Image: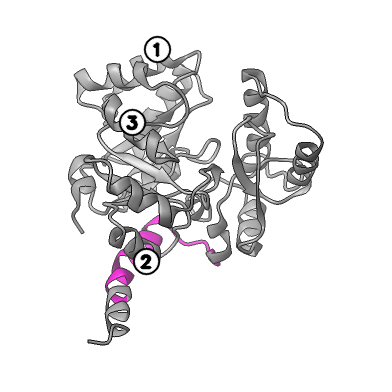
């Protein structure tokens, strides 16, 4: 299954593991890359020394390409880019913030810039800034999400940019892969689905929460980082929603750091109720915990059957 994305990233399948803070650690990243996709380390809240350790740990687990996700506004961004260049990481991803410092450092070293965006105008700006491809993430997605659904946003972006487009949000099986390709994407990005895999370091009780959740068990709140974030519904999420009904406040950098801490409490420490658990609506489709290889291979092999079933419904 070859597309411009597989050629650009040097991977077998056009499947990218979404970068998730406190989830996307070396065992998961390496497992995705070893299975033919692209794993991405979620390093937005790390220091340069921690980043270097995680990159080297990942390299010990895979010889395949992988990426690193950063936040341009990190106070450590210059040092982190130094590490990425020194370690020759092939792909850097980012989302919110001005990416100039990242792209300017990437280009001379041939590092692929792969941002995630949630609107047409931001995708256009990413292309203008020099991004090599763009992941568009619809409102279904976990974590920071758009106001627009993937099914609407994806073709709008595909029609407006020349760089390859990757679809994110609401994708968890072969049907999602085929649908994304049909709408013009050249690859897919999955985050929530990879949380519930054997190589994910997320505590088993949190994985079980995802398996038990249905498509209505997520909510969107701005009270974690100051930006819209889709998370699993729990006591803390309910409290945040109640707070939003009472007042809206501008969130500071300090509050963003606090928000990251509540994610760590859930995805690292296993706290179910008083934590923030970024997760997409696709949780309603997740009913098992396969290895990353099993997940990727059944998606790719199942795509042919999905296409055949679709064609059978067309009356000539």
Is residue 24 visible to the viewer in this orientation of the structure?
A: yes
In the displayed structure, would residue 110 be above or below residue 25? above
User: In terms of sequence position, does the residue under pointer 3 or pointer 1 come before the other?
Assistant: 1
Between circles 3 and 1, the one closer to the viewer is 3
Residue found at x 55% / y 52%: 280
Residue found at x 34% / y 58%: 180
> Which residue is the site of mark 2?
174
| Quadrant in which the C terminus appears | bottom left
Question: Tags 2 and 1 in contact by the CB under 8 Å rule?
Answer: no
Q: Could you tell me residue 196's position as x and y percent?
A: 53, 55
Name the quadrant containing residue 270.
top right
Taken as a whole, is the magenta stretch helix, strand or loop? helix
Which element carries disc 1, helix, strand or loop? Answer: helix
Front residue of this view, candidates 26 and 219 = 219
Disc 1 crowd, CA 10 A, few/some/many (<14, 14-19, 20+): some
Question: Tags 3 and 1 in contact by the CB under 8 Å rule?
Answer: no
User: In terms of sequence position, does the residue under pointer 2 or pointer 1 come before the other?
Assistant: 1
- Alpha-carbon span between mark 3 and mark 2: 28 Å
In the displayed structure, would residue 286 be above or below residue 238? below
Q: Residue furthest bottom?
A: 315
- Alpha-carbon span between mark 3 and mark 1: 20 Å
- Alpha-carbon span between mark 2 and mark 1: 39 Å
In the rendered structure, which segment of residues is drawn in magenta? Answer: 286-305
Horizontal side of 238 relative to 149 (left or right) equals right
Q: Which mark is residue 78?
A: 1
Which element carries disc 3, helix, strand or loop? Answer: helix
Is residue 91 visible to the viewer in this orientation of the structure?
A: no
Front residue of this view, candidates 83 and 71 = 71
> Which residue is the site of mark 3?
126
């Amino acid at each position: 299954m070859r597309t411009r994305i597989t050629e650009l990233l040097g991977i077998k399948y056009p499947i990218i593991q979404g970068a998730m803070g406190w989830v996307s650690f070396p065992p998961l990243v390496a497992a995705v890359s070893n299975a033919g996709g692209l794993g991405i380390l979620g390093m937005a809240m790390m220091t340069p020394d921690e980043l270097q350790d995680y990159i080297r740990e990942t390299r010990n687990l895979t010889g395949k390409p992988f990426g690193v996700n950063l936040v341009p506004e990190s106070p450590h961004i210059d040092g982190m880019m130094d590490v990425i260049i020194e370690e020759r990481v092939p792909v850097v991803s980012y989302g919110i913030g001005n990416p100039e410092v990242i792209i300017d450092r990437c280009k001379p070293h041939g590092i692929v810039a792969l941002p995630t965006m949630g609107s047409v105008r931001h995708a256009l700006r990413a292309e203008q800034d020099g991004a090599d491809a763009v992941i568009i993430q619809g409102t279904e997605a976990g974590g920071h999400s758009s106001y627009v659904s993937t099914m609407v946003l994806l073709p709008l972006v595909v029609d407006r940019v020349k760089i390859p487009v990757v679809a994110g949000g609401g994708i968890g099986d072969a049907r999602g892969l085929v649908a994304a390709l049909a709408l013009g994407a050249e690859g897919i990005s999955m985050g929530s689905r990879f949380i519930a895999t054997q190589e994910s370091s997320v505590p088993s009780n949190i994985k079980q929460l995802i398996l038990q959740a249905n498509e209505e068990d997520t909510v969107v709140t701005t009270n974690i980082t100051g930006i819209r974030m889709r998370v699993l519904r729990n006591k803390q999420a309910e409290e945040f929603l109640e707070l939003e009904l009472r007042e809206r406040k501008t969130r500071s950098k300090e509050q963003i750091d606090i928000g990251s801490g509540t994610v760590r409490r859930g995805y690292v420490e296993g706290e179910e109720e008083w934590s923030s658990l970024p997760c997409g609506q696709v949780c309603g489709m997740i009913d098992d915990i396969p290895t990353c290889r099993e997940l990727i291979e059944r998606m790719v092999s199942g795509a042919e059957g999905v296409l055949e079933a679709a064609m059978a419904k067309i009356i000539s």
